[in-house]
Image (tube, rainbow, N blue to C red):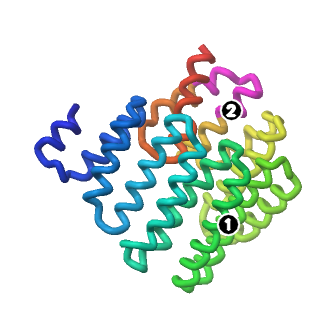
Amino acid sequence: AAYTRATEKDPKLAVAVLKKGHINSFLGNYAEARSAYDAAIADGKEAEKVTYGVFRAYTNVHAGQPKAAVEELTSVARAADAGVPSKQINGAKAFALVSALQIALHNDLLEDAERSLALYAPVVRADAKAVNDADNTRLTEAGVLSWESQLAARRGDFATALAKANEHKRLVENDQNPRRFETYHSLLGLIELRKKDFAQAIPHYRQADLTDIYQKYHLALALEGAGQTAEARKLFQDVASWNFNSVGFALTRRDAMRRATAAN
């Protein structure tokens, strides 16, 4: 209601229009959400149109239609070639494609995930080449390896998943960053989770980036699987009430709400 009043006063107040899209996605008002995003896209400037288009595609995830989301995000990435300044094209494309990749992986749409990764990797590598910094290139490759590890884990090819995770670790291990192994532990956690070895997954997810709602959700899954239901319930409740739109939240919100309630 507050954001509606804001848009009545200023129909071009982009943040209010966008937030109406987010909130209607959470409420299950998907037509209203898409209408709000369409209005934001219409008034958006250059790369903003791609960003708002990505959020529009998340509406499909909230609605339980992940394949439609992947298809829409692929189209959004393709559209970045027109109307986005050349220096911003790769960044805009990467945002759309990495979202498509995560959605496909989460829902075991593995052929879609492979196609999304094949589109995403050249984009981020081209961006790294343009930056022409050795550390940035190395971290870009570490990021690509993390997605390759996840794809292998989702396929059940745990040997490849572990090899990719270890190669990722090798590329970041000398960084002067106390959080450099968070992604590595999330990869090992996923491997153990997919093996249904929940007890082994828990310590890895505890060392992942738990400010990321998607990682917190996976820690909760591991805890639930290991019978540690009280802590799992609290984490599922945290995830369900996060209410900041992102691909990770869109993917986990509905299931986290169900599991938090079921755990009671």
Residue at position x 67%, y 54% from top?
A: 112
Left or right: residue 126 versus residue 28 is right
SS at mark 1 in the image:
helix
Q: From this view, report whether residue 76 is shown above or below residue 216.
A: below
Please name the residue shown 66% across and 42% down the image: 107
Residues drawn in magenta: 220-233
Q: Residue 108: image x %, image y %?
A: 71, 44
Helix, strand or loop at label 2? It is: helix
Image coords of residue 40 (percent x, y): 29, 52
Amino acid on which the number 1 mark rests in the picture: Ala
Location of residue 82 (image quadrant): bottom left
The quarter of the displayed image where residue 84 is located: bottom left
Give the residue number, with chain letter if any, for mark 2: 221
Q: Label 2 is placed on what type of residue?
A: Leu
Location of mark 1 (residue): 118
Taking 149 as reference, is 175 left or right? left
